[in-house]
Amino acid sequence: MDYKTVLTTCAYCGCGCGLYLEVLDGRLIGTLPSKTNPINEGKLCVKGWNIHEFVQHPSRLTKPLIRKNGTLTEASWDEALDYTASRLKEIKEAHGSHSIAFLASAKVTNEENYVIMKFARAAVGTNNVDHCARL
Amino acid sequence: MTNSVAEIEDADCIFVIGSNTTSSHPLVATRIFRAIAKGAKLVVADPRRIQLALKADTYVRQNLGTDVALLNGMMHVILKNNWHDQAFVEERCEGFEEFKEVIDNYPPEKVAETTGVSADDIVKIAEYYAKAEAASIVYCMGITQHTTGVDNVKSLANLAMLTGNMGKESTGVNPLRGQNNVQGACDMGGLPNVYSGYQAVNVIDNQTKFENAWNAKLSDQIGLTIPFMLSGLSEGTLKALYVVGENPMVSDPDIGHVEKAMKNAEFLVVQDIFRTPTAEFAHVVLPGTSFAEKDGTFTNTERRVQLVRKAVEPVGESKADWEIIQELSNRFGYQMNYESAEDIMEEISTLTPSYGGITYERLQGEGLAWPCPDKEHPGTKFLHKDKFARGLGLFHAIEYKPPAEVVDDEFPFWLSTGRVHVHYHTGTMTRVSPSLHAEIPEGTLEMHPEDAQRLAVREGEKVKVASRRGEITAKVTVTDRVDEGVVFMPFHFAETCANVLTNPAHDPTAKIPEFKVCAVKVEKAA
Ligand code: SF4
């Protein structure tokens, strides 16, 4: 049996409580509050206490999907990424950079938001980047 | 937030307006409870009698969308009684005369008619707030999700400046951010007008700096906000949309309009961890990872940057979102060669002055609140200490404007939307969580007992709710948390989707839709 706890930051609201994810043999089995985190000082709310539950849920997406004959069908990463890159290139060539837009995300990390906006601005060439800050 | 979460517990007065803190930000509510225990006064203004209202010294229930009138009324009382901070106003602010002229027209008796709050209560809450040694304002989407959202926020800033409650411990104007990393998404330039660190895209120096760093030609044309992306798709001027970790088919106002936009997209990519209602319209769906399966950072509501650490391997073939974008970019013809999330943060810190001193090594432990300009800087607990970012604090003269849609004979109920304590945003994560789902499995419509009696509906019975935009069926919860003539619904639930009803009319500056007010009719379902 391999048991460990990993200190991380809650993803369920902007408080940003510190918590430990409990991992047993690669499965998330529980959540414990961090006592030293300056926001939560050893407490969590009902969402935080249960945050390990959604991560390995069977309904997670596990493979890329491409729409073929109207239905979303499992595909390899190579196929999905090549297809996406070539469709975006075609659209940029036919209609210009500003015909493409991106929604970044208040749920992914800072680093990921940065890379998304860099891709939009430097690769595609548009400032059409927004996210659901207002929602 | 201008101030930190921990400071709230040492405030002498806390004014909570448009934030259901115990539901949406429980660990901020903890600080409010501690402040009360230490003797602080709590003032709550909210159209719904939220849990915090039960703890308030004074609770006022303003009519939906009348916040500017209420705040102007409070400031009228403060000025009339000389409870304002004259020295702070003179030394640190400007625009006072124009502001005062507007405020003169908001005597409490007149404001009472607009807001439904008695003149006595307006005087009382103004006194609590103004006379406190250190008073802190806490607000959330109840303030911002209006066509007058920016006016509301500016009015709160007026109130804090007028009383000198800025740039000191346990004061300030403190917005609580809705989603966990909204602050970070904004800081990182996930906005159409700025690069990371709010560096404007249409300032030539910024453009040159990023062109050199990124080795690419950049556009100085400000991009589209979400409402214009959606109308662009519907009208065919926008061809492709790439959505990462968002679910506009549940979260955006007027779902009928969103659906039309999604269907009309020539190419729609959805990168997410679940097959969301939005993914059903996609041409390509790419499986990203959750916070537990990757390294990175989040920035919380008090601007504190904290580490996110990988605990388990990604499920199936899913990949970290930054890796997906990097691989796509390389195939698209623009090279990215990051080896880790830490690599990306190194680049961020060189290009983003407010994150200049942030490194993963320094984030071990408590994290760092920005601005943190260099490697020695300890981070910033509260903003505007000796002066405002712009120099002098500017008073805005703001008149009250009614909401975009008001009730009438056909649509006689006011509808407001919001969150419940066990669910997060569009529910894709919390609703598959057995413990959270068990607490609140479905969305219901809150209705006042008198209204329920009039419509002859009982707790748990179904009603049809319709606005000018669409119709849904939902069960009723009978409660006096809402006022007569007002109904409330959470927006987390795709099958009883409150956003089928909501009004996409938005604030002219911030483009925030008016989720908090629209007009509906309600009738018993057959
Ligand atoms: S534990 Fe609760 S209060 Fe803390 S960050 Fe998570 S959701 Fe927010």
Image (spheres, coloured by chain):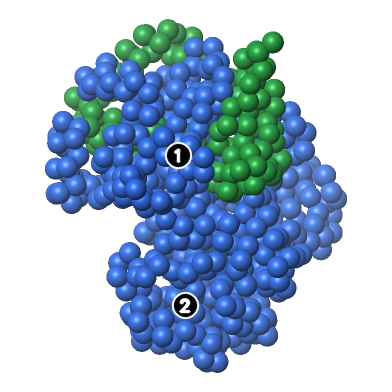
Mark 2 — residue? B164
Residue A96: assigned label: none
Cβ of mark 2 under 8 A from ligand 1: no
Q: Please give left or right for residue B223 compared with residue A20 in the image.
A: left
Shade of chain A as shown in the rendered figure: green
Q: Is residue B500 above or below residue B216?
A: below
Identify the secondary structure beneath mark 2.
loop
The residue located at (45%, 18%) in the rendering is B319
Callout 2: residue from which chain?
B
Question: Which residue appears farthest toward the bottom when viewing the image?
Answer: B81
Q: Please give left or right for residue B377 compared with residue A55 in the image.
A: left
Q: Position of residue B95 (x, y in %)?
A: 33, 80
Q: Which quadrant: the C terminus of chain B? A: top right
The residue located at (60%, 68%) in the rendering is B11
Callout 1: residue from which chain?
B
First in sequence: mark 1 vs mark 2 = 2
Mark 1 — residue? B363
Q: Determine which quarter of the picture holds residue A119.
A: top left
The residue located at (42%, 19%) in the rendering is B284
Q: Position of residue B261 (x, y in %)?
A: 42, 35
Q: In whole angstroms, how far apart are the C-alphas of marks 1 and 2? A: 33 Å
Residues under numbered marks 1 and 2 in contact, where contact means CB atoms less than 8 Å apart: no
Identify the secondary structure beneath mark 1.
helix
Q: Is residue B478 above or below residue B396?
A: above
Task: State whether residue B173 appears in this view.
Answer: yes
